[in-house]
Amino acid sequence: MNQNPERHSVRRIILPSGKSIEVVRFDDREKPAPTGLHVCPACSSVLVQPVSWSEAAGDRWELTLECPNCSWTEAGVYDRDQVDQLEERLDDGLAEMLGDLQRLTQANMAEDIDRFVFALRADHILPEDF
Ligand SMILES: [Zn+2]
């Protein structure tokens, strides 16, 4: 894949041990200003989520939206396309979170292995430990 090094973001995560890892995310797409129900009109956060929903007349949905960043909230009736887009955005967010969780789990496992190897070399692990 042809990655443009200028289009990436780096997030540094500090593990409980104090060791830090960098999560680098590449993005080949130009990002237009986000629009849609997931964008908070008060603080521009893209983390707005539905906190309640019910079907309304005419293939529409009544949603209560809430921004976890600034606590903005609004109830409204939205059409199917808007709700589908919000659902897609929520799915993307979940996939990103699971990806980050997986990288974090791998980093923690690598740390556990480092500790185990260190303990083995220092003769702190003996046959009777098993
Ligand atoms: Zn907000």
Image (cartoon, helix red, strand yellow):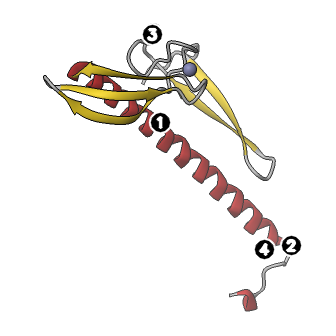
- Quadrant assignment for the C terminus: bottom right
Q: Image quadrant of residue 100? A: top right
Q: Which residue is mark 2?
A: 122
Mark 2 Cβ and ligand 1 under 8 Å apart: no
Say which element carries label 4.
helix
The residue wearing badge 1 is 96
If you read the primary sequence from the N terminus, does the residue marked by circle 4 or circle 1 appear first? 1
Secondary structure category for the residue under label 1: helix
Q: Residues within 10 Å of mark 2 (few under 14, many from 20)?
A: few
| Residue at numbered disc 3 | 30
Q: Nearer the viewer, mark 1 or mark 2?
A: 1
Tags 2 and 4 touching, CB below 8 Å: yes
The residue shown at (71%, 56%) is 111
Mark 3 or 1: the one toward you:
1
Mark closest to the chain's N terminus, 3 or 1: 3
Q: Badge 4 is on which residue?
A: 120
Instruction: Give the mark toward the camera: 2 or 3.
Output: 3
Between the C-alphas of marks 3 and 1, the distance is: 18 Å
